[in-house]
Image (cartoon, grey):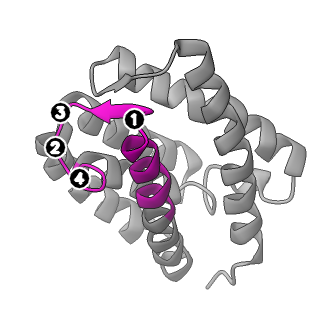
Amino acid sequence: MNPFINVGINQAIWFLCVLGGNTGALFALPLLVVNILLSRHRRADLQMIGLMLLIGTFVDGTLQAIGFFSFTSAGFPIPLWLAVVWGALAALPHHSLAWMKKRILLSVLFGALGGPLAYYAGVRLGAATFHWPLLASLALLAVVWAFLWTGVMAFAARQRLQ
C-alpha cells in the first residue's frame, strides 16, 4: 500500500474519531476496512489490530480508571472512538512506518513524542480531559509510549508478512 494513502487514512480516522466521538467512529470504521483491503499484509495487519486493541484497552482503560484522564464520549473500559483510533494506529507498522521496525532508538523517540502529542491534541480538541497537571501528564505519556511503541515495532519486525 502506498504509505501516503496509509497515513492519510489514519489521519482521517483520527480526526473523525476525535472530533466526532462515538458517532465519528461509525464513519471511521469503513476507512479502517479500506485500509485493510488495500493492504498486501492483511493477516499481519489484522493480528496487529487485535494486539493494539488489547493494549489500548488495557493502557487507556487503566489510565482512565486511576483518574489520569476522562473522555467526553462514554464507553467502558474505553469509548468506541478510541478503540477505532487504536485499530487505525495498528495499520501503520507494516506500511508507512515499516522503515522504523528495526530502529529501536527512533521507535523510542517516536513513541515518547508522538504518543503525548496525539493525546494533547485530543484534549485540546475536546475529546478528553487530563486530570493531572499538563507537564506530569505529558511526561507519564512519554514514558508509557516510549516503551509501548518500541514493543509494537519489535513485534511488527518479528511478524511474518504474507
Q: Is residue 119 left or right of residue 73?
A: right
| Disc 3 residue crowd, few under 14, some 14–19, many 20+, Cα 10 Å | some
Task: Name the residue furthest left.
Answer: 23
Discs 1, 2 touching: Cβ within 8 Å: no
**What's the residue at 71%, 34% (across, down)?**
112
First along the sequence among labels 4 and 3? 3
Q: Nearer the viewer, residue 23 or 79?
A: 79
Q: Which residue is mark 3?
A: 20
Q: Earlier in the sequence, mark 4 or mark 2?
A: 2
- What number is the disc on residue 74? 2
Give the residue type at disc 2. Answer: Ala
Q: Earlier in the sequence, mark 2 or mark 3?
A: 3
Asked if marks 2 and 3 touch (Cβ < 8 Å), the reply is no
Residue indicated by mark 1: 67
Q: Earlier in the sequence, mark 1 or mark 4?
A: 1
- The answer to whether the residues at label 4 and label 3 have Cβ atoms under 8 Å apart is no
Seen in the picture, residue 27 relative to 90 is either above or below; the reply is above
The nearer-to-camera label among 4 and 3 is 4
Q: Is residue 50 above or below residue 117?
A: below
Circle 2 residues within 10 Å: few <14, some 14–19, many ≥20: few
- Residue 57, horizontal then vertical, whole percent: 41, 59
Question: Which one is closest to the eye, mark 1 or mark 3?
Answer: 1
The disc label shown at residue 90, or none: none
Nearer the camera: disc 2 or disc 3: 2
